[in-house]
């Protein structure tokens, strides 16, 4: 089989996918805030280095077997992730988080979903309807009456989505060999990408200007992004890659809710309708 299925961790694909969307949304919200205080490259370097250390420790404690495929796919995934996250955090810092996160989320789903259809065949009619509702929900959530997103921010968010789509495919196939080692090597590569990007910054921008607040946000990013990646890989092992990807891609809803609750960004009726559609999409995909 081209796609392995080895749900050895317990749980179900819907639960894993929704856990991914919650954790990714928290991570992106924190990243957008941190990028307003500190250069994104420094944030990524710290957050991913921290998660790399945690993952290596877990792999060693669990005596996880290591193979060459996990290394290769993890490194490819990490390169895409490192460039993608720096690009996305820059987009998130340029205006409303909702629009940038939604644009990235929609683009991110396209490549894994099409790949899944090519390898696994189309999903059922109800699931396809759920996918369509989810895409519409993300677009509606992105529409805000107080948007200040610049066109450049949207292009950056779309570019980040392409990179994340490639990352998700690499992570899916790596999960069939070793979930934790694939994650660890992903973080090794993305940390290196972050350090490289930091080294190219002007000397005046290489300082950690956000203080303890930015440090706390970077820690939340490390835990949220890594935890989200873990649940995504488990969702693909427990079910289809397209369902896992679409459910995970609902994370802009989490980012939007946090922006409303914490930053007092105003949510429109259109965005509220998007959240209702997101719930309906989850119900259809779960059937």
Image (spheres, helix red, strand yellow):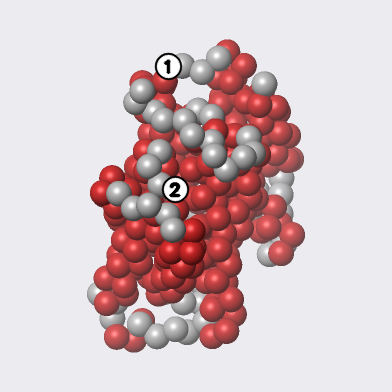
In the rendered image of this protein, does residue 61 appear above or below residue 247? Answer: below
Q: CA distance from mark 2 to mark 1?
A: 24 Å
Q: Nearer the viewer, residue 144 or 59?
A: 59
Name the quadrant containing residue 131.
top right
Where does residue 88 sit, x and y in percent of width and height?
Answer: 43, 56
When the figure is inspected, residue 127 is found, relative to residue 169, above or below; the finding is: above
Q: Whole-percent x and y of residue 103?
A: 48, 44
Residue 63 vs residue 273, the one in the foreground: 63
> Which quadrant would residue 29 be assigned to in this image?
bottom right
Query: Residue 88, relative to residue 277: is it above or below?
Result: below
Of residues 258 and 172, the one nearer the viewer is: 172
**Few, some or many C-alpha atoms within 10 Å of disc 1 (few <14, some 14-19, many ≥20)?**
few
Q: Counting other residues with Cα less than 10 Å from the Cα at mark 2, is it few (<14), some (14-19), or many (20 or more)?
A: many
Furthest residue toward front: 63
Q: Is residue 264 left or right of residue 177?
A: right
Q: Is residue 74 left or right of residue 260?
A: left
The disc label shown at residue 179, or none: 2
Secondary structure found at label 2: helix
Q: Which residue is mark 1?
A: 121
The mark lying in front, picked from 2 and 1, is 2
Indicate which disc residue 96 carries: none
State the image coordinates of residue 13 (x, y, percent, origin top left). Answer: 59, 34
Residue 53: quadrant of the picture: bottom left
- Coordinates of residue 181 in the picture (x, y in percent): 39, 54
Asked if residue 111 can be seen in this view, the reply is: yes
* Residue drawn at (47%, 30%) of the image: 5
């Amino acid at each position: 089989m081209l796609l392995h299925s080895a749900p050895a961790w317990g749980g179900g694909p819907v639960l894993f996918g929704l856990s991914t969307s919650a954790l990714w949304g928290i991570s992106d919200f924190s990243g957008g805030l941190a990028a307003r205080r500190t250069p994104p490259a420094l944030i990524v370097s710290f957050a991913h280095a921290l998660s790399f250390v945690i993952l290596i420790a877990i792999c060693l404690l669990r005596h996880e077997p290591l193979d060459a495929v996990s290394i290769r796919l993890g490194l490819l995934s990490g390169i895409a992730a490192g460039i993608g996250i720096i690009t996305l955090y820059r987009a998130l810092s340029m205006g409303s988080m909702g629009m940038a996160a939604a644009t990235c989320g929609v683009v991110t789903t396209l490549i894994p979903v099409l790949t899944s259809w090519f390898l696994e065949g189309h999903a059922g009619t109800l699931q396809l309807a759920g996918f369509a509702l989810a895409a519409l929900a993300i677009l509606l959530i992105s529409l805000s009456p107080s948007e200040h997103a610049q066109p450049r921010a949207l292009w950056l968010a779309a570019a980040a989505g392409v990179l994340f789509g490639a990352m998700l495919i690499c992570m899916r196939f790596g999960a069939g060999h070793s979930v934790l080692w694939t994650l660890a090597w992903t973080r090794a590569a993305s940390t290196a990408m972050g350090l490289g990007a930091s080294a190219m910054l002007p000397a005046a921008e290489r300082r950690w200007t956000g203080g303890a607040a930015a440090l706390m946000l970077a820690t939340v990013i490390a835990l949220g992004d890594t935890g989200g990646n873990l649940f995504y890989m488990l969702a693909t092992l427990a079910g289809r890659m397209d369902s896992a990807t679409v459910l995970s891609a609902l994370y802009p809803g989490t980012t939007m809710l946090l922006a409303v609750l914490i930053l007092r960004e105003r949510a429109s009726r259109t965005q509220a309708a998007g959240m209702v559609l997101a719930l309906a999409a989850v119900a259809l995909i779960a059937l």
